[in-house]
Amino acid sequence: MVRIAPLAPPYEADVEQALRKWMPPGVAEEPLALFRVLQHHRELASRMRVLGAGLLAHGELPALDREIVIARVTARCGCRYEWGVHAAVFAPAVGLTPEQLEATVSGDSRHPAWPERHRALIAAVDELHDTATVSDAAWAALAEHYPASQLLEFLVLAGWYRTIAYVAGGVGLDEEPWAAPYPGG
């Protein structure tokens, strides 16, 4: 049961304008339920949009690596909502296979679908999730593949999507009807 219902049309003019900023240009679909929930606190939503959009559209991490981090963070948090949105929209666009997406849920970082750098990402996400830190060994494995700027971005990205998982899970968002189904039901 949703604890804070997403706003529904017709929207006030300023809400309509804010929601359109969250969505890519020319998209006719209704803005995501998450965005419509965030509009209950317009100032917070405005601040969040800047960071979220920056991480998705202007980051230094390769897009494929970014989506692996997002999928693993949201899977570890049990956030079917955000996992399903990214699995449906972003994962295919960057070349993530259905087998790889399933592995982000199963936690098989040693799966043959992952090259060494992606195994390092998944292991580091798992450590962050479990301990809120990254061991020296996991950091060294990441540093073999990523410069300092991308390592910082990785940490912010993982934390951002944990925040998104907290919001979606905390308010009890239902999965988008068009989202990819979460493996295992």
Image (cartoon, helix red, strand yellow):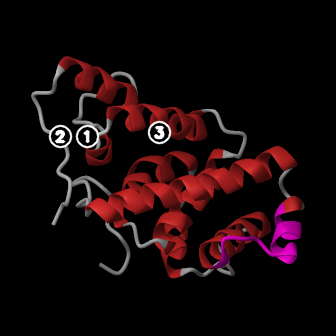
Does residue 172 sit above or below 85 in this rendering? below
Residue located beneath label 1 in the image: 40
Real-space Cα separation, disc 3 to disc 1, in angstroms: 13 Å
Percent across and percent down for residue 93 are: 50, 45
**Label 3 SS:** helix
Percent across and percent down for residue 154 are: 69, 54
Q: Residues within 10 Å of mark 3 (few under 14, many from 20)?
A: some
**Label 2 SS:** loop
* Residue 180 visible, this orientation: no
| Residue at (34, 65) in percent of width and height | 169
Query: Bounds of the magenta span?
Result: 131-142
What's under tag 3, amino acid-wise? Met
Percent across and percent down for residue 173 are: 26, 59
Real-space Cα separation, disc 2 to disc 1, in angstroms: 8 Å
* Residue 42 visible, this orientation: yes
Residue 48, numbered label: 3
The answer to which quarter of the image holds residue 172 is bottom left
Placement of the C terminus among the 4 image quadrants = bottom left
Dominant secondary structure (helix, strand or loop) of the stretch shown in magenta: helix
Real-space Cα separation, disc 3 to disc 2, in angstroms: 17 Å
Mark 3 and mark 1 residues within 8 Å of each other at the beta carbon:
no
Q: Residues within 10 Å of mark 1 (few under 14, many from 20)?
A: some
